[in-house]
Image (spheres, rainbow, N blue to C red):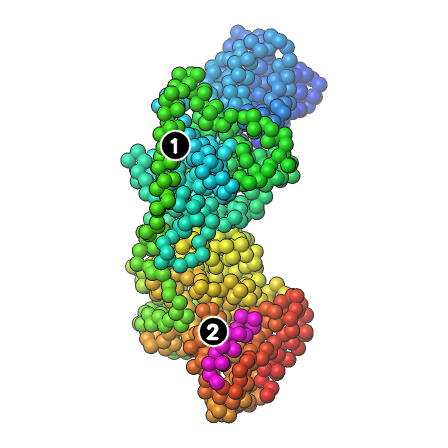
């Protein structure tokens, strides 16, 4: 693109004829034109040359006399008829050279911007910003008038004036990267608002006093905490205090532009300051937590978390605009909260029915090292414009300390800036000096306005520093002595700004001191009040969660409402098998739909995918939306779901479940980008925002979920106990040993089971479509929400025995925690062995037992691992008084459910006083890899474990 806008600007009128003919002559004989023009033409890129070539016309055609372009900004006017060729040449060359210089500043000006408040980085000189590069080499070139037709606000300007305007606009306290953007409207919008450096005159005395007040609150809060809570880690904002005015500016601008909800995600640095000064957490509550008090009432269970991980929310009125503002809790795992915040905003937008994506917005704050180093940043950016995940753009505020923990930028990222990854989605990037508060606030307002205008992500790179080490007890001079010598000598941002305002007469030193004194008194009063402060209300189960209750410890609660009326089931089933008219359906899919029709009509043989669709459809008829996302989930990894039908002629899509009846709720099914970590985080964020939607994430194979392990460990398993955030997310993890190798066999159930405690989630390995149906429906039929982790089948999707009758979905049916023996055996007291198992291996066991005619071995299915169903298991096995008990699994001994169920089964047997007092393990030997990659070895192992389980 380099040079295209320059040539388009110059190619107008008589100049077009002159330049085009000159270019044609140069193409034929480079040495035949003036050396200045020859050098100019040689420097152009291919795209610009193509424009000039088009202007000359075809080789056999007459030479053109005009060239018209839509990009007329700064067009060079036709030369006067009286001008001599030499004058025309000189004026044209000056204009083109000046326009090329202007474009270079738009592209490269940020390289010489004054961004570092520490002044440690040597001033860089970039050759493309040197006028000499464009032929301006003589002293008198600086003061010769050059016609540029309104560019930079000048009709005609000297080179000296042009350079001054460019350096003020692009090389001051704001350095902007925007020329990588492909949308001309976005580039033009930024260019108009940056050129002329309007931030230098944008604020009157009242606005400056407001910025000073916000800086004072940020600065004094940190100073107070450092003095009152000596030695306490708080990950303060010192050195980056301009973050607080920036956040105020973003929020206020967004509210004025129609945003009524904002969710903030951020790391631990500066969180306490943001909590009290932005999200309005009471100072007295925070200081109480500094003293060791809990952030929740004593009657609310949970482990809690350190204060710099917690969040809160508030309702504000800004310039008459109501706005709900929340700060999301998150762990120390940097950037993990990013997709969670974006998922929450998508949920809010969907709840409001806002397809413009303008009424709710995410602000995501980052550290410089994390923004460059954590791959989740890219995953979150990559979702930003996808149909299933877009939110109208997020504002990313990078608090750039110019250091990681102890790692310098040269070791932290390979690019020029820590924000380079944002160019992958063509986000504009505003680099701004953190010690220039007015420039920071201007950039923040600009970012919010741009987001509202174009619905895309925007990045602010707030270049600042970290006055202390990684935390307040860390000594940074061990590894960064030069940086910290400079920091020690530098006055605070607030002090520098107060001095500047006093010098210019906007805010006197006395007024600045009064602002400081007033806030200090507020801090002292809160500190005294904290000594007797007690939390009287938990920050949860309000708003959209009103009516929800904290779950008790009942492990086997029966939710009778998981059954659906038969009429409703048939209505859904009819829609599943009814494609629209004139829809070119794939013949194989047509046969599948006919099979579904027969299932519903006969009430028999309902398979897994149909059972799932019946759960979705009946929930939708009850008024609940359903959201399912994951890799290839519309069709299903194993071609089982086909929830979205595709016309074979025109590629049009049709979702049967959205066409049950006119007044129903809807389902959204999105094939995700190839990401686990980011997408699972997004769906978690969605699920914690709306308790009335069934939200599901499906792994392409269950094995791949470990790419999102941070999200599972830090959020899904422990989010409620740490942060009082309920979540009803369902994880569908294809699982089963079927000879497909180490990475396509195990969903690693042992990892989820290791995380189970305090009734935090449900983990199941189901064996019937009906039980799957009830498990899904109970997610929304309870008055609380818990994550549900399901090991879902692969080969069982089409197994002739893995089917259910329609009656098992209807009235009188419910979820089965344990499925007892179903075949006719000898009398219970004559049964010699009870095999307890879970999932697919049941069908291998029962098929072999039937083939061998074994009647004295009972098989009991443990459908739910956790919460462990003690009562149901006891009822299923207590009659087998003389039988030994074995646990059979396909997974290696160190995987699967064995280590989890071993002592729990023993506990049940101890209560029964039967012959068996301990279960015995039957399954594969312990192994480092979850499965063999050799089909013959797999088959032999599977046959051996089945034989051992059944052989008494």
What segment carries the magenta color? 897-913
Main secondary structure found in the magenta portion: helix
Q: Residues within 10 Å of mark 2 (few under 14, many from 20)?
A: many
For marks 2 and 1, the one nearer the N-term is 1
Residue 240's spot in the image, x, y percent? 49, 33
Which quadrant of the rendered structure holds the N terminus?
top right
Queried whether the magenta region covers residue 905, the answer comes back as yes
Q: In this view of the protein, which residue sits in the foreground, 806 or 363?
A: 363
Left or right of residue 88, residue 357 in this image: left
Left or right of residue 724, residue 888 in this image: right
Q: Residue at x 37, y 74 (%)?
A: 814
**Dot label at residue 863:** 2
Queried whether the magenta region covers residue 875, the answer comes back as no
**Dot label at residue 520:** 1
Disc 2 element: loop
Q: In this view of the protein, which residue sits in the foreground, 422 or 910?
A: 910
Against 872, residue 830 (above or below) is below
Q: Quick check: can you spot residue 776?
A: yes
Disc 1 element: helix
**Dot label at residue 614:** none
Residue 933's spot in the image, x, y percent? 67, 67
Residue 163's spot in the image, x, y percent? 55, 17
Residue 615: quadrant of the picture: bottom left
Q: Residues within 10 Å of mark 1 (few under 14, many from 20)?
A: some
Residue 786: quadrant of the picture: bottom left
Q: Residue at x 48, y 55 (%)?
A: 715
Q: In this view of the protein, which residue sits in the foreground, 733 or 298?
A: 298
């Amino acid at each position: 693109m380099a040079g295209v806008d320059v040539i388009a600007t110059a190619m107008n009128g008589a100049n077009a004829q002159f330049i085009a003919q000159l270019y044609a002559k140069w193409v034929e004989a480079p040495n035949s034109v003036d050396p200045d023009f020859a050098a100019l033409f040689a420097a152009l890129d291919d795209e610009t040359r193509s424009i000039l070539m088009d202007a000359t016309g075809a080789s056999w055609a007459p030479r053109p006399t005009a060239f018209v372009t839509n990009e007329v900004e700064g067009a060079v006017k036709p030369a006067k008829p009286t001008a001599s060729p030499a004058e025309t040449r000189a004026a044209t060359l000056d204009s083109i050279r000046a326009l090329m210089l202007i474009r270079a500043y738009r592209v490269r000006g940020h390289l010489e911007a004054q961004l570092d408040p520490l002044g440690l980085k040597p001033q860089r000189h970039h050759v493309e910003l040197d006028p000499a590069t464009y032929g301006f080499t003589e002293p008198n070139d600086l003061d010769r008038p050059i016609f540029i037709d309104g560019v930079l606000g000048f009709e005609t300007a000297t080179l000296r004036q042009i350079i001054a305007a460019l350096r003020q606009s692009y090389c001051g306290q704001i350095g902007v990267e925007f020329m990588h953007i492909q949308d001309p409207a976005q580039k033009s919008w930024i260019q108009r608002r940056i050129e002329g450096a309007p931030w230098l005159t944008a604020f009157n005395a009242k606005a400056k006093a407001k910025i000073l007040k916000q800086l004072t609150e940020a600065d004094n809060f940190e100073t107070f905490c450092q003095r009152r809570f000596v030695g306490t880690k708080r990950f303060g904002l010192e050195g980056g205090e301009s973050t607080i005015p920036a956040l105020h500016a973003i929020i206020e601008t967004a509210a004025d532009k129609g945003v009524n909800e904002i969710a903030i995600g951020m790391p631990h640095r500066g969180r306490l300051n943001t909590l009290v000064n932005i999200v309005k957490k009471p100072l007295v509550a925070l200081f109480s937590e500094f003293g060791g008090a809990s952030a929740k009432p004593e009657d609310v269970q949970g482990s809690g978390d350190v204060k710099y991980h917690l969040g809160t929310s508030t309702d504000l009125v800004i310039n008459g605009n109501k706005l709900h503002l929340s700060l999301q809790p998150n762990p120390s795992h940097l950037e993990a909260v990013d997709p969670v915040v974006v998922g929450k905003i998508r949920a809010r937008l969907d709840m409001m029915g806002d397809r413009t994506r303008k009424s709710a917005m995410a602000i995501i704050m980052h550290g410089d090292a994390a923004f460059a180093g954590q791959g989740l940043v890219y995953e979150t950016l990559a979702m930003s414009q996808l149909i299933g995940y877009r939110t109208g753009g997020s504002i990313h505020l990078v608090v750039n300390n110019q250091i990681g923990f102890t790692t310098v930028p040269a070791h932290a990222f390979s690019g020029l800036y820590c924000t380079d990854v944002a160019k992958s989605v063509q986000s504009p990037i505003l680099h701004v000096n953190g010690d220039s508060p007015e420039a920071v606030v201007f950039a923040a307002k600009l970012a919010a306005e741009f987001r509202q205008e174009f619905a895309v992500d925007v990045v602010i790179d707030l270049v600042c520093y970290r006055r202390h080490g990684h935390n307040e007890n860390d000594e940074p001079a061990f590894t960064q002595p030069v940086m910290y010598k400079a920091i020690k000598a530098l006055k605070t941002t607030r002090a520098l700004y107060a001095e500047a305002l006093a010098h210019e007469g906007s805010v006197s030193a006395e007024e600045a001191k009064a602002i400081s004194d007033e806030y200090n008194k507020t801090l002292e009063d809160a500190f005294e009040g904290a000594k007797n402060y007690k939390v009287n209300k938990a920050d949860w189960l309000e708003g959209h969660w009103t009516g929800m209750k904290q779950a008790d410890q009942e492990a086997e609660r029966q939710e009778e409402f998981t059954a659906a009326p038969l009429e409703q089931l048939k209505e859904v089933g009819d829609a599943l098998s009814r494609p629209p008219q004139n829809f070119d359906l794939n013949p194989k899919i047509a046969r599948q739909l006919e099979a579904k029709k027969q299932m519903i009509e006969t009430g028999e043989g309902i398979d897994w995918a149909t059972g799932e669709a019946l759960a979705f459809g009946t929930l939708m008829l009850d008024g609940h939306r359903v959201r399912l996302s994951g890799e290839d989930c519309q069709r299903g990894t194993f071609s089982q779901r086909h929830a979205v039908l595709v016309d074979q002629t025109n590629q049009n899509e049709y979702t049967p479940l959205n066409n049950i009846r006119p007044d129903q709720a809807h389902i959204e099914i999105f094939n995700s980008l190839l990401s686990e970590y980011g997408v699972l985080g997004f769906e978690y964020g969605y699920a914690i925002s709306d308790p009335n939607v069934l939200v599901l994430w499906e792994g392409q194979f269950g094995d791949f979920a470990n790419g999102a392990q941070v999200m599972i460990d830090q959020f899904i398993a422990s989010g409620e106990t740490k942060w009082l955030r309920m979540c009803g997310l369902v994880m569908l993890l294809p699982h089963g040993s079927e000879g497909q190798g180490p990475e396509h066999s195990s969903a690693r159930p042992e990892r989820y089971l290791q995380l189970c405690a305090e009734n935090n989630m449900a983990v199941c390995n189901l064996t019937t479509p009906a039980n799957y149906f009830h498990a899904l429906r109970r997610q929304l039929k309870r008055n609380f929400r818990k994550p549900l982790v399901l090991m879902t089948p692969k080969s069982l999707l089409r197994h002739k025995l893995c089917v259910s009758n329609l009656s098992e979905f209807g009235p009188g049916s419910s979820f089965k925690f344990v499925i007892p023996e179903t075949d006719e055996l000898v009398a219970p007291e004559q049964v010699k062995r009870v095999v307890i198992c879970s999932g697919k291996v049941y069908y291998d066991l029962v098929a072999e037992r039937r083939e061998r005619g074994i009647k004295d071995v009972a098989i009991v299915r443990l459908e739910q691992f956790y919460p462990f169903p003690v009562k149901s298991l006891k009822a299923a096995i207590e009659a087998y008084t003389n039988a030994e008990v074995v646990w059979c699994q396909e997974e290696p001994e160190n995987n699967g459910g064995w280590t989890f169920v071993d002592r729990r089964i023993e506990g049940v047997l101890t209560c029964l006083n039967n012959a068996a007092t301990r279960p015995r393990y039957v399954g594969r030997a312990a192994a480092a890899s979850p499965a063999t990659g050799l089909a013959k070895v797999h088959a032999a192992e599977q046959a051996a474990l089945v034989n051992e389980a059944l052989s008494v």
